[in-house]
Amino acid sequence: MAYSRKNQVWQKRAKVSNLVLIALVIAAGGGYLVSINNLVVKGFVLEEAQKKLAVLNDENRDLEIKRASLESYSDVEARLQKLQMVAVDKIDYLKVDPGSLAKK
């Protein structure tokens, strides 16, 4: 009878241990699924950000080309003629006596 009592106690402990192990395996599996899901979502966000960066780099390159063409000498000269501006031949500077200036 003592043998069967000890056997029953060990069987209960084995069942509890098995349930705890099963619960731990299920919890670890759930944690694994959550972490994998987060990684996948971050991967999609990163891919979308990289696509957006590529588009912005293309736009930036196009704007740099447009800026360079607008700053070119031939373009500036054409715009000056359109505005009917004339070239300056000689610049005359004013000469001021240092004593006639206001001091701080």
Image (cartoon, grey):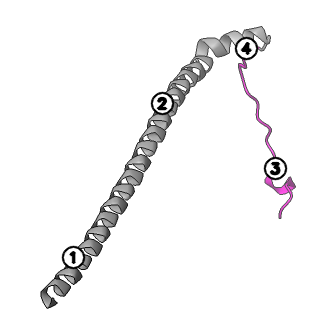
Q: Amino acid at mark 4?
A: Leu
Of 83 and 96, the residue lying toward us: 83
Mark 3 lies on a secondary structure that is loop
Instruction: Tell us which disc is closer to us: 2 or 1.
Output: 1
Q: Residue at x 37, y 49 (%)?
A: 36
User: How far apart, in angstroms, are the residues tagged by discs 4 and 2?
Assistant: 41 Å
Instruction: Tell us which disc is closer to us: 3 or 2.
Output: 2
In reply to whether residue 44 is colored magenta, the answer given is no
Of 24 and 82, the residue lying toward us: 24
Query: Mark 3 or mark 2, which has the lower sequence index?
Result: 2
Mark 2 lies on a secondary structure that is helix
For label 2, the residue is: 51
Q: Residues within 10 Å of mark 4 (few under 14, many from 20)?
A: few
Instruction: Tell us which disc is closer to us: 1 or 3.
Output: 1
User: How far apart, in angstroms, are the residues tagged by discs 1 and 4?
Assistant: 99 Å
Q: Quadrant of the N terminus?
A: bottom left
Q: Is residue 104 left or right of residue 48?
A: right
Of 1 and 90, the residue lying toward us: 1
Q: Tell me: residue 98, above or below residue 43.
A: below
The magenta region covers 86-104
Q: Is residue 77 left or right of residue 34?
A: right
Mark 1 lies on a secondary structure that is helix
User: How far apart, in angstroms, are the residues tagged by discs 3 and 2?
Assistant: 64 Å
Q: Amino acid at mark 3?
A: Asp
For label 1, the residue is: 11
Mark 4 touches mark 3? (CB < 8 Å)? no
Residue 58, given in percent of the width and then of the height, sits at: 51, 24
Q: Is residue 40 left or right of residue 13?
A: right
Residue 99, given in percent of the width and then of the height, sits at: 83, 56
Residue 24, given in percent of the width and then of the height, sits at: 32, 66
Q: Residues within 10 Å of mark 2 (few under 14, many from 20)?
A: few
